[in-house]
Amino acid sequence: MGNEWRVRFWKDKWCGDSPLCMPFPSLFALVDSKEVWVVDIWDSSTQRGRGGWNPCFSRPFNDWEVDMLESFLVQLHGKRVCGDVEDTVL
């Protein structure tokens, strides 16, 4: 993927075959910012310096939403923003 400074986390196709808002509409409804950029969700200071995803939601999850959240996190697993290579997602 190209320059992540201009790729929207939820609305652009960067993590799979469709934008994340399509397979996860219930999670998308709960996000604080629907226009947030990929680079703004990436927290490079977590997981022993390797970074991690940190999306912000408007409320805690209900029990019945946990499976959807798990699927979402599985989709993100292994993807990371690499700032030293033109802010590319690997």
Image (cartoon, rainbow, N blue to C red):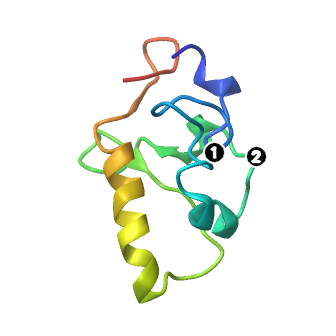
Report the amino acid beneath label 1: Trp
- Nearer to me, 65 or 7: 65
Give how far apart the Cα atoms at labels 2 and 1 are.
7 Å
* Marking on residue 35: 2
Marks 2 and 1: CB-CB under 8 Å?
yes
Q: Residue at x 56, y 13 (%)?
A: 2
- Note whether 36 is above or below 82 in the view shown: below
Q: Residue at x 65, y 26 (%)?
A: 5
Q: Position of residue 26 (x, y in %)?
A: 60, 67
Report the amino acid beneath label 2: Glu
Q: Position of residue 34 (x, y in %)?
A: 73, 53
Q: Position of residue 28 (x, y in %)?
A: 64, 60
- Note whether 50 is above or below 74 in the view shown: above
- Nearer to me, 88 or 45: 88
Q: Secondary structure at mark 2?
A: loop
Q: Is residue 47 left or right of residue 89?
A: left
Task: Tell me the quarter of the picture where residue 29 sits.
Answer: bottom right
Q: Residue at x 28, y 37 (%)?
A: 78
Q: Residue at x 42, y 66 (%)?
A: 69
Q: Secondary structure at mark 1?
A: loop
Q: Which residue is mark 1?
A: 10
Few, some or many C-alpha atoms within 10 Å of disc 2 (few <14, some 14-19, many ≥20)?
few
Chain-order first, disc 2 or disc 1: 1
- Nearer to me, 13 or 5: 13
Nearer mark to the viewer, of 2 and 1: 1
